[in-house]
Each structure stands twice: as C-alpha cells, then as structure tokens.
Image (cartoon, helix red, strand yellow):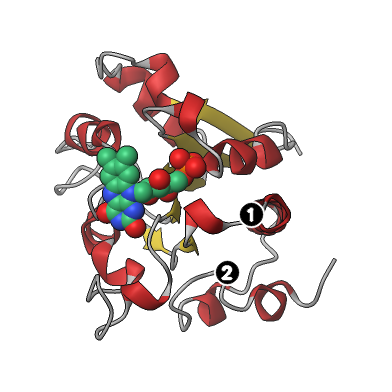
Amino acid sequence: MTSPRVLILFAHPALEKSRVNRVLADAVRDLPGVTFRDLYQHYPDLDIDVEVEQELLGAHEIVVFQHPLYWYSTPAIIKEWFDLVLQHGWAYGSDGTALVGKQVLTVTTTGSSEESYQPDGLNLYSLRQLLAPVQRTAEFCGMEYLPPFGIHSSFSLTGEEVAGHAADYRRVIEALRDGRLDRAKAKTLPKINADLDSLLGGRS
Ligand SMILES: Cc1cc2nc3c(=O)[nH]c(=O)nc-3n(C[C@H](O)[C@H](O)[C@H](O)COP(=O)(O)O)c2cc1C
C-alpha cells in the first residue's frame, strides 16, 4: 500500500473521561493505511487550519468521523470543521469537486440504549435519522454516506463488550481500506455494525 486511504477524524472534548471512544481509537490508530487525527488535540481552541484539513482530505478516499453523540449531534469541533473546511468552490458549487466520490462513515457512541432510539422510545428518532445533517452535508459535497457504526448504552457496557465493539470497528476500517465491505448491502442496514459478518463475507 503506497499511501493511507482512510482518514479518521476523532473528536472527544473530554478524552480523560472516556470509557468507550478511547478503546475504539486505540484499536484503529496504528493501522497501516489509516491516518488517525485527534481534532481536539490539534485544535484545543477550535482554531482549525483549513488548508491542512483540505490537503488531508484530498489525500484520502475514506473519511471517518468518530465521536460520542453529544446532544443528538456531533461535538462542536466537527460542526466547526464542516463550517470552515467545506468551502464553496472547493467542496461544493460548480467548481467544488474536491470530495466527489469519497466515502464517509460516522462512528459514534451513545449513553442511551438502542431501544430508546426508536419511534416509540425515549429519543423518538434513530441514530441514522439524527445524523441526517452529516449525511446530507456529505452528499451535498458528492460523497457517499454509509450508515453509522453505532454503539449504545455506553455507561453499562462491560469491558469485554467494549473490546468486542473495538474489534468490530477495526474490522470495518480494514475492510473499507481494502475495498472489501459490501457497501450496497450496508446501505440497507440501520447501522453498519447491525450485521457485520454479512457485509464482510464472514469472520476473517
Ligand atoms: C455534553 C454531553 C451530551 C450528551 N448527549 C447525549 C445524547 O444526546 N444522547 C445520548 O444517548 N448520550 C448523550 N451523552 C452521553 C455520551 O454520548 C456518552 O457519555 C458517550 O457516548 C460515552 O463515550 P465515552 O466513554 O467515549 O465518553 C452526552 C454526554 C455529554 C457529556
């Protein structure tokens, strides 16, 4: 492999308190073909370097946003990143074609249970519905949006369960990197990790 294909943009504003995202990050940060970038570490004051971010995007084919779900959305730095980096004439508009054809995946964790993210549950909307702004932003820029990798009930997961999700995350990133993930099938699922074995052609 000559250059990294996957860019993971990681955002956790209180990493010292993290139980789940920290373990997920450790499972993928050193993978060959993957660039792992901690946005809050680079930009603690949200002072995003647009040129650097655009250059990184240009150099990768798959963009992953990994973060805890905060107030039914992304942590603030990802919204700031969208607002500043996805410029007219570069990311969208008649001359803005820099991102066309790239793939986008959200990897996120929630405190509430999976059942609560149903029409008759506490949160009324599914994770996929709540992430519609990210999906539409990606699609508006000509990118292909995959269903999210979602992990629920973060506070009650055992260490073993967290490790299992981290191993699944690693498998998804490796499969995306290697072009082995069945994206057409994935798009029929509410979450990319709802039925991983069927997307990856069995356990590897
Ligand atoms: C500011 C804030 C907002 C949150 N908003 C939500 C939310 O909207 N829905 C939810 O299910 N959990 C919410 N949570 C819980 C986090 O999603 C949860 O703590 C996180 O996913 C756990 O991952 P970690 O162990 O890596 O921190 C929120 C937590 C914080 C601190």
88 lies above or below 53: below
Q: In the image as oriented, which residue stretches furthest toward the right?
A: 204
> Which residue is painted at 44% across and 17% down in the image?
41
**Three-letter residue code for mark 2:** Asn
Q: Which mark is on residue 193?
A: 2
Q: Is residue 4 left or right of residue 108?
A: right
| Relative horizontal placement of residue 99, taking residue 199 as reference (left or right) | left
Q: Nearer the viewer, residue 63 or 193?
A: 193
Q: Position of residue 89 (x, y in %)?
A: 17, 37
Query: Is 180 in front, or is 127?
Result: 127
Nearest the eye: 109 or 54: 109
Labels 1 and 2 touching (C-beta < 8 A): yes
- Which quarter of the image is occupied by the N terminus? top right
Q: Residue at x 71, y 72 (%)?
A: 200
Asked whether residue 184 is in view, the answer is yes
| Location of residue 128 (image quadrant) | bottom left
State which quadrant residue 126 falls in. bottom left
Question: Please, is residue 65 above or below residue 13 in the view?
Answer: below
Mark 1 within 8 Å of ligand 1, using the beta carbon? no
Q: Give the labeled residue for mark 1.
A: 169
Sequence-wise, the earlier of marks 1 and 2 is 1
**Number of marks in picture:** 2
**Residue in the image at 65% along x and 33% along y:** 29
Which quarter of the rendered picture does the C terminus lie within? bottom right
Mark 2 surroundings: few (<14), some (14-19) or many (≥20) residues within 10 A: many
Q: Is residue 65 visible?
A: no
- Residue, far front: 156
Q: Amino acid at mark 1?
A: Tyr
Q: Residue at x 26, y 71 (%)?
A: 129
Residue 69, x across and y down, in percent: 34, 50
Q: Is residue 74 above or below residue 117?
A: above
Tag 2's secondary structure? loop
